[in-house]
Image: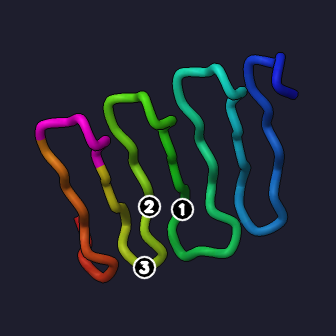
Amino acid sequence: MKNSKNRTIFDDNSENRTIFADNSENRTILAENYNSKNRTIFEDKSENRKIFADISENRTILAENCEHNMIFEEKQQK
């Protein structure tokens, strides 16, 4: 719900899925059918966004206003 602080929805193919309310500081969405363990997406005004790629262990994309941008290749490991 929009007025709740957070929502947790358990998904069939992942351990859990957490979606924070619209006004929360961050949002976490776990991938449903991907090979990654989880996927984290921060809202647009946050300092960074972390998105786990389909094949690699993680992919990090920093927000547009950050000093650095880092993108891990899909097949690249940590």
Q: Which of marks 1 and 2 is nearer the N terminus?
A: 1
Report the residue marked by disc 2.
52
Picture quarter with the C terminus: bottom left
**Which label number is shown at residue 55?**
3
Viewer-nearest of labels 1 and 2? 2
Foreground residue among 15 and 4? 4
The span picked out in magenta is 62-67
Q: Earlier in the sequence, mark 1 or mark 3?
A: 1
Query: What is the CA distance from the residue labelled 1 to the residue labelled 3?
Result: 10 Å
The kind of residue tagged 3 is Ile
**Above or below — where is 7 with respect to 4?**
below
In the picture, measured across the screen, residue 59 lies left or right of residue 11, that is: left
Image location (x, y in percent) of residue 30: 63, 54
x 68%, y 28%: residue: 22
Image location (x, y in percent) of residue 53: 43, 69
Query: What is the CA distance from the residue labelled 2 to the residue labelled 3?
Result: 9 Å
Residue most extreme to the bottom: 75
**Residues under numbered marks 1 and 2 in contact, where contact means CB atoms less than 8 Å apart:** yes
> Residue 68 is drawn in which quadrant?
top left
Report the residue marked by disc 1.
37
Element on which disc 2 rests: loop
Image location (x, y in percent) of residue 60: 31, 54
Q: Does the segment drawn in magenta span residue 66? A: yes
**Residues under numbered marks 2 and 3 in contact, where contact means CB atoms less than 8 Å apart:** no
In the picture, measured across the screen, residue 77 lies left or right of residue 37, that is: left
